[in-house]
Amino acid sequence: MNEVSASELLAAWESGSEVSVQAKNALLSGAHFNVWLDPVPAPRLRGVLRRRVTATQRRGRTVVGATECLANLAEMGERGLLVGYVDDRERAGYWFQLYVDPHPLKVIGCVGVGISPGDDPVTGSA
């Protein structure tokens, strides 16, 4: 696999959670997205996500889907997952962080962060 297309990513979603529906709608509306193809161990991703959610909430930013996503990451054991995003900041104000099982391609977690178009999606600051 050299890259993940929008249609492949849309087909990889199984969750009907509110945050997943929002991210899929953003993708259908043409929002920019990317999935990195280098797997990262699920426990490492869970630790990073936990710290980012805490820091983002301290800044007063809205975070949706984090509890479910953290639980899904915990269920993945030591598996290597792909990380991606759907950037819907221009339309709805959310940056959606995705966690994807590469075999078979399946979105196992999605977190939406409410940040402005000019803000850095990783740090949450301008």
Image: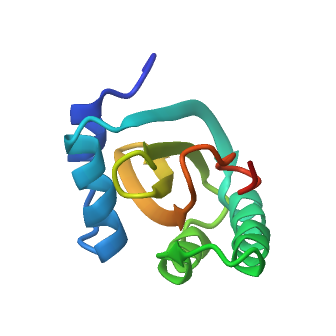
Residue 96 image position (x, y, % from top left)? 47, 55
Left or right: where does residue 114 sit relative to residue 21?
Answer: right
- Count of all numbered marks drawn on residues in the image: 0
Q: Residue at horizontal 55%, vertical 43%?
A: 82
Task: Identify whether 77 is placed above or below 13.
Answer: below
The colour scheme used here is: rainbow
Residue 39, quarter of picture: top right
> Which of these two is toward me, 108 or 96?
96
Residue 13 image position (x, y, % from top left)? 28, 55
> Which of these two is toward me, 125 or 54?
125
Residue 45 image position (x, y, % from top left)? 70, 58
Q: Looking at this rendering, what residue extends furthest in the top direction?
A: 2
Left or right: where does residue 70 sit relative to residue 20?
Answer: right
> Which of these two is toward me, 71 or 80?
71
Residue 47 image position (x, y, % from top left)? 77, 68
Q: Residue at horizontal 48%, vertical 76%?
A: 64
For the N terminus, which image quadrant?
A: top left
> Which of these two is toward me, 13 or 105?
13
Q: Residue at horizontal 38%, vertical 28%?
A: 4
